[in-house]
Structures are given as structure tokens and as C-alpha cells.
Image (tube, grey):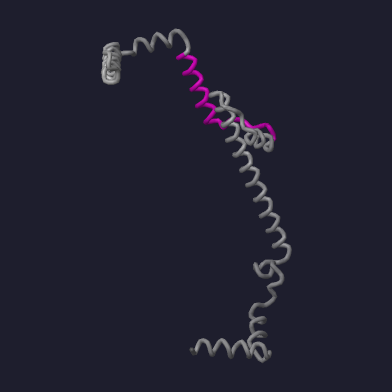
Amino acid sequence: MAFLMKTMISSQVKNLGLGGRSEEQKEEGGTSDPAAAQGMTREEYEEYQKQVIEEKMERDAAFTQKKAERACLRVHLREKYRLPKSEMDENQIQMAGDDVDLPEDLRKMVDEDQEEEEDKDSILGQLQNLQNMDLDTIKEKAQATFTEIKQTAEQKCSVM
């Protein structure tokens, strides 16, 4: 109740212009000037604003470059796996200036993958795969699969 009375009385006093408002304005001081509010001179404040804008532009450029590199990677993967192209990725690459390549770490990984695929596709790679196969386990898997198919067929078919 006391709080309610205090707020009502103080608002009435402020409306009359007897006190409160002029004191608040004196305490705030001249906050209309942003340089003074920051505790700087006008020239220092302008220089600070220029630096902030330059840093923002640098961050935006780096962000755009990273987005374009990611888009380039997605385009490369789509080509590799023969997936449909995306216009959004192509637009991001064009926005970065079309001079975007895969990042160096990813380029190394892609080159290694290509070498492995080439080795597997060659005749020597196929021969190595044949040597690595365990014929006994393959034979066991084939027999288990055949037995399983035979059992399901016997259960479903009344002739057998």
C-alpha cells in the first residue's frame, strides 16, 4: 500500500514540475552526443566507428568465403556421387567471385579417395580383393542363406 501511495504522489509531483524531472536530466548529462557517452573525443569516436565497420566487412568477407568453400565441397560431392546439382551452391560460389577452391585439407582427402578408388578399379586391386576373401566364410553364408530361403519357401508353399 505504501508503494502505491509513493508512486501516485511522485507522479503527481513530477506532473506539476516541482521536482524530479530536472534532477534526472542533470544526472544524465548530454547523452545526445554518442562520443561523449563513450568517453571519447569526436575524432576518436569517428575513428572507432570506421574500425568497427572495417572489421565487420572483413568478417563478412571471410564468412562469404567459407560459405563458398562449403558450397564448392557440396558441388564436388554431388559430381562424385552423381547427385542433382543445387542452384543455391552455384550462387554462393558466384557471390564469392568464382575463385573458390576446396580447402587444402579437404583437397588432400579427396585426392587420397580418388587414388584408392583408382586402385580398386584396376585389375591388381580386384586381384587383391580376391586374395583377401575367405572362401569358407562366404561358402557358409551362402549355405545359410540358401537354407533360410528353402525353409521359408516350404512354410509358404503347400506343394513342397
Residue at (57, 35) in percent of width and height? 70
Closest to the observer, 128 or 90: 90
- Residue 145, by quadrant, is top left
What secondary structure do most residues of the magenta stretch adopt? Answer: helix
Foreground pick, 47 / 115? 115
In reply to whether residue 57 is colored magenta, the answer given is no
Give coordinates of residue 7: x percent, y percent. Answer: 56, 86
| Percent coordinates x, y for residue 160 in the rendering | 26, 13
Compared with residue 106, is residue 25 higher up or lower down, i.e. above or below? below
159 left or right, relative to 117: left
Q: In this rendering, does residue 137 appear at all?
A: no
Q: Position of residue 83 (x, y in %)?
A: 56, 26
Residue 124 in view = yes
**Residue 50 lies in quadrant:** bottom right
- In x, y percent, where is residue 112? 49, 22
Left or right: residue 77 compared with residue 12: left
Q: Is residue 35 above or below residue 16?
A: above
Instruction: Please tell me which residue is depicted at 65% across the width and 67% down the height of the picture.
Output: 38
Which residue is located at x 52 percent, y 87 percent?
A: 4
> Foreground: 78 or 124?
78
Residue at 60 percent across and 34 percent down: it is 71
Q: How many marks?
A: 0
Q: Which residues are magenta?
A: 97-120
